[in-house]
Image (tube, rainbow, N blue to C red):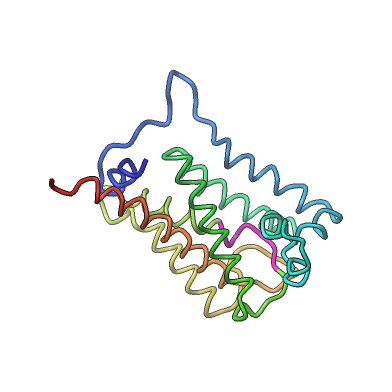
Amino acid sequence: MNLWLYNTLTGQQHPPAYAGGVSFIPVITLSIIFLAFPFSLSTELFQLGYFDQRLISEGELWRLISGHLSHTSTSHLSWDILAFALAAGYLERYSKRLLLLSILGGLITVNGLLLSPWSGVSSYAGLSGILFAPLFISLLLFARKQPSLSGWLPMLICIGKVIWEQFSGQALLSQSPWPPYPAAHLAGVLGGLCCLFIPMTKARDMNKPA
């Protein structure tokens, strides 16, 4: 998989999205989206699931995961699911393992930020933080596939959105009764970068001259 990713990023061929005549179904992506609905639409499950520093410190460790599945409004849920479906679904076509690795990387970096004394927040909810890990990798893969500079346009738009949110302190699209927390998006990008660096490093090692 690591060599496959390296070849993809450097413009080599990648395996097709179809095998044996069966259409590709992004099972991992759809499963995570499915789990987000009850934690977001049920008041009881939302209260049980959202990220809360104090409750996590008291032993409710499931919130480290369920907090990212919980959303504070239908607008918040809709935009996060749309972005996650596009980013994760695109990446899952290339490698399920890489998608899982990016989600894990996003969980580690975003949770690490939220639990740190520098976070500035005690409560958090939403997929928008961790989805930036697979989103960053997907945009990089897309850019490398395109023969012209236009392939990098989605990446540039994404970077511009993140920068604007950091300086404005506002969410660009979704509406939520909770204050936005753009720093989680940067943490998600960092998670994607970390995941990308590890397999690419191994791929280079595999291609070193004897």
206 or 9: nearer the eye? 206
Rendered residue at 77%/57% (across/down): 49
Q: Is residue 15 above or below residue 189?
A: above
137 or 207: nearer the eye? 207
Q: Which residues are magenta?
A: 124-130
Q: Is residue 53 above or below residue 34?
A: below
The single residue placed furthest to the left in the displayed view is 210
Task: Determine the image quadrant of residue 131.
Answer: bottom right
The single residue placed furthest to the top in the displayed view is 21
Q: Main secondary structure of the magenta part?
A: loop
Rendered residue at 82%/60% (across/down): 47
Lateral position of residue 18 relative to residue 172, left or right: left
Relative image position of residue 181 (x, y in whole percent): 62, 72
Lateral position of residue 122 relative to residue 82, left or right: right
Task: Determine the image quadrant of residue 56.
Answer: bottom right
Let me know if residue 167 is in the magenta part. Answer: no
Relative image position of residue 6 (x, y in whole percent): 30, 47
Rendered residue at 45%/18% (across/down): 21
73 or 173: nearer the eye? 73
Rendered residue at 62%/55% (across/down): 80
Q: Is residue 33 above or below residue 135?
A: above
Relative image position of residue 117 (x, y in whole percent): 62, 80
Which quadrant would the N terminus be assigned to in this image?
A: top left
